[in-house]
Image (cartoon, grey):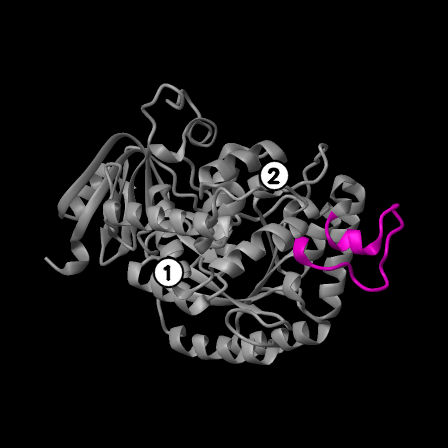
Amino acid sequence: MSGADTAEFLIEPRWLLPVAPGDPVLEGHAVAVNGGRILAVGPAAELRERYPARERVVRERHALLPGLVNAHTCACHMLLRGVPVRGPRLRWLLETLAPLERRALSADFVRDGTRLAIAAMLRAGITCYADHSPLPEEAARVAAAAQVRALIGLPVSDEPSASAEDATAHLARAEALWDEYRNDARIGLFFAPQPAAGLSDATLARVRRVADELDARTVIHLDELPYPPGHEVHTGVTTHDLSAGVADAATPTRHAWGVRRLTHLEALGLLRPGFAAVGALACSEDAARLLARHGAALIACPQAELRLQRGTRTLAGARPGALGTDTPAAVGALDMLAEARSAALLYGLPALEALRLATLGGALALGVAAQTGSIEPGKSADLTCIDLDASSCRPATDVAAAIVFGATRTQVSDVWSAGRVAVSEGRLRLFAEEELAAIAARWAERLALEAAA
């Protein structure tokens, strides 16, 4: 019998949610895995006969779905959880978060924070994430050592940062890191211009040219962009206040602002396939249509966007194509099930569509849908199993609704990253829990001393 006719293991859940186009929720089905990839999906009895496996993983009360995809985060900020959080976003970022990050930032800070974040994401069923790290070299090394799928942002700004002194130096470092990881199967790179740190139109044009040369993706957070010159709106606040996000309380102004920002980026040639905008609550339907016309993606981080709103009245913006958690300093937990629930409630989405945003939608936005995001033969075996036996989420008829509206990340029982066991029966396998606890305690003490000083 050839290797093609055998499987390393079969996963046999009660329910299977492939999240592939046209595939419903399936019962009595299994997934065969071999060599880190999905070998076959089909009726469990048929796969047992067709692919003799060394191991059967039977989960009689569980749902199996693709590994969740966190399309926007800053992993090392796991060490900054607990900082005061009060919107608007840009003011909080510049006046609260950035000063803390500058005081604490080091290679150790990024390495330790990223390790903690990867462990937390795996526990929560997240097998792929996009990281906006201040030190991308360190973030990439940690992700590579953990053997997880990560897309690492390459920061670019005109102002000095921890990694470079100006835009030219940022781009030089970005190209060097690109050369280092260009053939890596799990670590990808994209450009992450930093408008909050200072970014001219000329630098954005340079980013576009280099991204074209490398065939790289670009991601920009809309709420960190300044107001486009010549597009002031008379709302009773100053242009400076607008750039700081004070107009967030006025939803029509906020949405008009999003359109005009995107129109400005369009004029610079940035809107195209491979571009993603973060911040769906800042976008109107007109803005979403503009992105769609250019084949660009819209990523929402519902919990962070809601928490960092300035006003008490918040209306949903444009419907996104993918979901992220944003920085854990804003939301605390890296929890894509909670983001899917928030998205379903905000945008009136069916539960299965919300799960799609948290899986295949994120993979499409990040350019890795050929490898992950759905359960299909040939894709990487990035899989998450959720125990639905709890009374709060035991499904009657709608399994997807039971997951989105009843389950929490604590019910993730098993996670596989490229076929490798990351979590088994609720226990993290890729990291030593004692080591992680020691890292967290050490940094909590150190940051408390920094704050006191």
Name the residue carrying label 2.
307
Residue 290 vs residue 317, the one in the foreground = 317
* Quadrant in which residue 199 is drawn: bottom right
- Residue 159 image position (x, y, % from top left): 63, 71
Type of secondary structure dominating the magenta stretch: loop
- Left or right of 429 on screen, residue 126: right
Q: How many marks?
A: 2
98 shown above or below 337: below
Q: Nearer the viewer, mark 2 or mark 1?
A: 1
Q: Is residue 293 magenta?
A: no
- Left or right of 334 on screen, residue 51: left
- Can residue 32 be seen at all in this image of the molecule? no
411 shown above or below 444: above
- Can residue 247 be seen at all in this image of the molecule? yes
Q: Residue at x 52, y 77 (%)?
A: 214
Q: Which mark is residue 111?
A: 1
SS type, badge 2: helix
Mark before the other along the chain sequence, 2 or 1? 1
Q: Amino acid at mark 2?
A: Arg
* Quadrant in which residue 306 is drawn: top right
The N terminus lies in quadrant: bottom left
Q: Is residue 229 magenta?
A: yes
Q: Amino acid at mark 1?
A: Arg
Q: Residues within 10 Å of mark 2 (few under 14, many from 20)?
A: some
* Quadrant in which residue 290 is drawn: bottom right
Residue 191 vs residue 139, the one in the foreground = 139
- Residue 105 image position (x, y, % from top left): 47, 61
Q: Which residues are magenta?
A: 223-245
- Left or right of 298 on screen, residue 214: left
- Residue 132 image position (x, y, % from top left): 51, 59
- Residue 72 image position (x, y, % from top left): 52, 53
